[in-house]
Image (cartoon, coloured by chain):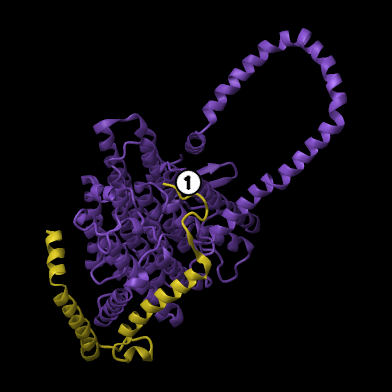
Chain colours: A purple, B yellow
Amino acid sequence: MNDLWLHPALILIAGAVLVPFIKGRARTVLLVLVPALAFGRVLSLEPGTHGVVRFLDWNLTFGRVDRLSQVFGYIMTLMCILGTFYALHVKEAANHVAAWFYVAGSLGAIYAGDYLTLFLFWELMAFSSVFLIWLRGRRQSVGVGFRYLLVHTVGGLILLCGIMLRYQATGGDLSFNLLDVAHPDLSTWLIMIGFILNAAVPPLHAWLPDAYGEATVTGSVFLCAFTTKTAVYALCRGCAGMDILVPLGVIMAIYGVVYAVLENDARKLLAYHIISQVGYMVAGVGLGTQMAINGACAHAFAHILYKGLLFMGTGSVLYMTGKSKFTELGGLYKKMPWAFVFTLVGGLSISAFPLFSGFVSKSMIVAAGFSEHRNTAAFCLMLASAGTFLHTGLKVPYFIWFGKNNCSPETYERAADPPWNMIVAMAVTSLLCIGIGCYTPFLYSKLPYPVEYHPYTAYHVSETLQILLFTAVGFFLFLKKLVPTPTISLDMDWFYRMSGRAVRWFARAPVQAADEWVSEFYRFTGLAGLMAWARASARFDWDAIDGVVDGFARGVRGTGDRLRHLQRNQLQANMFYAVVAIVLMVLTYVLI
Amino acid sequence: MIIQLIEFLQRHLKKVIVACWVLLALLVIGDALFVDKEHAHTAAEHWVGFWSVFGFLSCLVIIFVSKWYGHLGIMKSEDYYGDSDE
């Protein structure tokens, strides 16, 4: 490195490498200390360009620090502190290692000043976060993880194609700045598609509910924060003002709400609401005005906290009872009252209730829409916000803590408020959600542009309360319609899941049939002559060759056998070690 | 503490419901009489209780459209993909 500039991601990577070797109380200290150090490092960053490294023909910029990257760096490391504290009780080191590498990837992407560095950390995020799914350890976790990885690999390749085309078109300029969104060429489209795949814009979104519903309890708390919001950052940086993002964002906002009505798994419901909420941010980026970009950043900031809180709340139910489906829960308020209160705070925050964080952030984007005279888009976003309260504010708390008690006796017996570290993490996150909603300068002073927006006008408060409270009327009047059913809803992943199945069928049916036919044909025509020849050569084989070869063959078979046992069932672990090794090699190469 | 509060509200459910209706009425009346609508974006927003109706109808639209969509064949049994064990 040509100047001694410590990247905050490096602190997390160093911490992640240490975690497996440190046990007991020292591990707890490390788990608290490392994210706090990374957060402190983000706070101490000076604006400017740092960490420029010459790599082959290119200058890689690891540290572009400005107001836009700082607001995201701040919230990502803050969430890392909260998420790690929530996971303090987790003994398995791999959980922490994967989570920290994942956050490091996000931070690396946020501070990247060029597309190559961005791409490097973009991929680090995908390859580390998949372990948060695999570590759940259920039979289906493996498949979900591979689907997640497959989709993100395709997205990464599209992004890389865009970067290469751009490199060619600009004559070697790789700096990561605002693209020419008014006259987009193929490279701009490809880069944009790479970004919106990670932001889960339909039809490229199905990986999100698939993965976040399946990840570990603590893994989902991380997953819900980093991938989509890093993509929002990248869109703010590269695609601000790209008009197509406005309709795409509005579609997202409503799409997520529709699927949330049908969803039976609480964490999948929350995942669909990520799509809905990120829709506001994507629409804000599409509007591209200073107020809209401020709104997108503010909403990303608030969203990371309240969505993390919601995943902590429902995660604690899953952790304590082993269940996350509404049809297997209900009536738990006596058993898990604190988890209920914190989840409710998250629900009120995401619903943009006055005095909660969503109120001061979401409204900024809607107001930016109205002030740009995009009334249809703004009204659609208002409609989606009714849906948000309907599900996250009402359906989730009602059908887990009240409603009909669908718990089996064992589930109800097991239910209780979670361990102290989970409670503390949820309490602090709740306080932050309320604090941001009550004291607006805390958030507004961090935004990229000066803020002239005042959320607490009589009109805005009255408007919001009317929408939300009359949505509640609708909820209670039509409660019977909303009772969850034990079903799943087909989504865009159907296409790749079914095409995978078609390939398997093809391999099994026609190919196997052809194979059998050929064998049969061979048996009838070639076998007799072959047998005679075989008998003759067998004698030679037994007498002469075996003696020599057997010893060697036994050796090879033994080695093969050992290798086979080493490989089997440990694919994930092997990939993990490979990825860690590659990352370390690249970092070493870059830094030295 | 939380449990006692919830059970207190449950014991007085009828009163709670009446209080909620009163609150809703006050909200609409207060909006009509006292709230400055100078910064409203469209003419419709000047109607009394516009956002109340908007909120209620949004809720109904979301519930019924989603359910209709779900019953078009989107909702399937949990074993549809054949990997739904615990």
Image side of residue A38 versus residue A229, left or right: left
Q: Position of residue A256 (x, y in %)?
A: 44, 66
Q: Which residue is mark 1?
A: A140
Q: Position of residue A213 (x, y in %)?
A: 41, 53
Q: Position of residue A77 (x, y in %)?
A: 34, 50
Comparing A417 with B35, the one in front is: A417
Residue name at image x 39 percent, y 34 percent: A17
Comparing A434 with A545, the one in front is: A545
Helix, strand or loop at mark 1: helix
Q: Is residue A434 above or below residue A52?
A: below
Q: Quadrant of residue A346?
A: bottom left
Q: Quadrant of residue A131?
A: top left
Q: Is residue A16 above or below residue A72?
A: above
How many marks do you count on the picture?
1
Query: Looking at numbered disc 1 in the image, what kind of residue is underneath it?
Result: Gln
Residue name at image x 60 percent, y 44 percent: A57
Q: Position of residue A48 (x, y in %)?
A: 41, 53
Q: Quadrant of residue A458?
A: bottom left
